[in-house]
Image: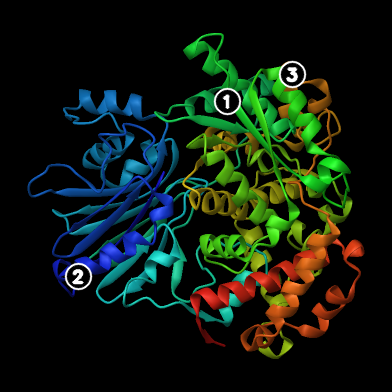
Amino acid sequence: MCGITGWVSFHSDARTQTPVIEAMTATLAPRGPDAGGVWVGERAAIGHRRLAVIDLEGGVQPMADRPDEPAIVLSYSGEVYNHHRLRAELRDRGHVFRTRSDTEVVLRAYAEWGEAVAEHLDGMFAFAVWDEREQRLLLVRDRLGVKPLYWAAADGGLVFASEPKALFAHPEIRPRVDADGLREAYSLLFNTGPTVWSGVREVEPGGLLVLDRDGIRERRYWQLEAAPHTDDRDTTVERIRELVGAAAPSQLEADVPLCSLLSGGIDSTVLTALLADELRSREGREARMRSYAVDYSDQAVAFTGDVLRTGHDTPYAIEAGAFIGTDHSTVVLDPHDLLDLEHRRAVVVARDSPIGVGDMDTSLYLLFGEIRQHSTVALSGEAADEVFGGYPWFHSPRALSAGTFPWLLVTGDEAAMPLNPELDLRIPEFRDDTYRTALAAVPHLDGETPAEHRQRELQHLSLTRWLRQLLHRKDRLSMAQGLEVRVPYCDHRLVEYAFTTPWALKSHDGREKSLLRAAGAGLAPDSVLHRPKNHYPATHHPDYNRGLQQMAREALATEQVRALADETRIKPCLDTAPERLEWGHRLRLERVVDLALWLDHYRPELAL
C-alpha cells in the first residue's frame, strides 16, 4: 500500500519544478514509510511513497517500462490479487518482467491494454500512468473505491494525489471551502466526486479519468447491474461460500507479517476462519493467524450499551479466536487517551476533513498503531453488512417507507453538528435533491415487487454511499499508521452476485445476513453465528464525556468555529450531566472539536 501524487501540465516544463513534486510526495510519507521517489519529465511529474508488502526489493516506484527514455511511468497504490495469472498471460503475449511485484504487472498490463487495463485487474488500487508516447495521463480507481484518488484542475492540466493534503503542496491548489463543500461534508450523504474542498474531486469508484491535449474525460468501467437470479437457496448459499472462500485466501499474499481484525461478529469471524485455514494449508498445521480486537478499560470492567451496541464484543472475539485457533490479542484502550489532542489532531489530518465519528476514529487510529508494531497487513470484515443486508434499516418498516437516506434515521440531525443558520446552506433541500438523484441511479428489473424494488434501492444506496465513508475511514486511519488493510468482502464478484440475489433469499431465516450465516456454518461458534448485529465499540466513561464537553467549550471560544456552528443547539449538549450524555449528542460535540482542529491545521479560505 502506498501514496501516489503528481501533475501534468501542457503549459509549463515540469523539469523546473522538482522541489514541488518532492514536497507533494513528502506529505504522503505516513502512507509509505519505507521509501519514496519521484520522476520528472517535460510535461509530467510523478511522485510515490511506498509501504513495501510484495517484492520488497523489486517494487520500487515510480516504475518505468525501461530505464532510459521511458515510454510509460506508473505510480501505483494497492494490491492486485490476480497478478500471478496476469503475469503468465502477459508473458505469453511477449512481455518480459524484471521484478515479481504486482506493480510491474499493472505497468505491463497498461502497455498491452491501454486504458482497458482496469477491467483486467482484481483488487483494491488507485494508480496513475503517464504515457510519454501519447502525452496522456490515466487515473484509475478500483471498483468499490477502497483506495482513494483525488484530483484538481490546474493551468494546462491537473494535479492528483491519494490525499488532498498532497494537492495543497502544489502552488496552484489552495485549501478553500465554499458553501457547496460544507453541504457535502455535513449533509452526511457521502457523494462520490465532489469533496469538502472547493475544486477538489475524487475519481469515482469503478471509474477512470484521461487527460490529454484535448482535455479531460471521465468514464465508469464498472458499476452495479440488476440481473435475474435463477439459483435456489441451497445453490445460492453454496455460491456465496465459494465466492467468500475464494476472495479471502486470494488476499493473503504478503512478504511481511499479516493479521486479521476479529471483533467477535459473524463477518470477521467467518473471514478469519477462512484465512486461518488457508494459512495452515500453506505453512503447515502449526501455523497460527494473528488476530486483534479493541476494547476500552471501562467497558472491560462493566459494559454499558447504547442504541448501537447491545453486547460486549470482547468475550465473543476471544471465543472466536479460540474456536478458530488464532493467536488472539485484545488491545485495551484507556478512555483518557482518546482525549489527547495530538491523537485527535493526527486523526483529523489523516482524514483531511472535519467529518468523522470522534472517539471511534481516534480509537481505531490507536488500535492500528498497536497492530503496526507486529503486522504490516491486516484483513477486515468491512462491507459484509452492505453486501448481505446487516444494517437495521434493511429490516425496519420506518426505513423502508422513509423518503430519504436510511442512515439519516439513525444519525440525522441528532448526530450532525448543527451549522450556523445564517450560512443558509439549505441542507434539507440538498438532501432531497441528492436522494432523488441517487434513486435514479439504481438499476431495477422488470416485474420486481414493490418490496424487492425498495430493498434493491437500500442495497444500492448502502454499497455506493454508506460504504464509501467506512472505506475512507479505514484507509485513512490505517495508512496514517503505515498499516495496509484489505477488505475481502469488497471482492467485486461477490458484490455483484449478492446484489442480484433477491431479498427473500438474503433474509431467508428472518434475520440479517442470512446468506453469510448459512455459508459460514461450521466456521464460527454458534454463539457468534447467531449473535445480533453490534457496531464498533465505544467508551461510555463519564470522564471521557466530561473531557469532551470541556474541549467543545474551548473550540467554541474560537471565532471561526462560532461562525460555522449553531451554538444554541450545541449548548444543551454542554449542559447535560456527563453520565447522561447520549450518543447522538456526544457525536455532535465530537464534530465541534474536530472542526476546530481542522480549521487550525489547514487554515482554509472560507468562501461562504
Q: Which mark is residue 243?
A: 1
Is residue 46 shown to the viewer in this render?
A: yes
- Looking at marks 1 and 2 on the same chain, the residue that comes earlier in the sequence is marked by 2
Q: Which mark is residue 17?
A: 2
How dense is the environment of label 3, judged by Cα within 10 Å: few (below 14), some, or many (20 and up)?
A: few
- Looking at marks 3 and 2 on the same chain, the residue that comes earlier in the sequence is marked by 2
The Cα atoms of the two marked residues, 1 and 2, are separated by: 48 Å
The Cα atoms of the two marked residues, 1 and 3, are separated by: 15 Å
Q: Quadrant of residue 108?
A: top left
Q: Nearer the viewer, residue 258 or 240?
A: 258
- Quarter holding the C terminus? bottom right
Q: Which mark is residue 528?
A: none
Assign a secondary structure to mark 1. Answer: helix
Please state which of the two labelled residues, at mark 1 or mark 3, is closer to the viewer. 3
Give amino acid for label 3: Ala
Give amino acid for label 1: Leu
Q: Where does residue 384 sit, x and y in percent of width and height?
A: 66, 38
Relative side of 469 to 601, left or right: right
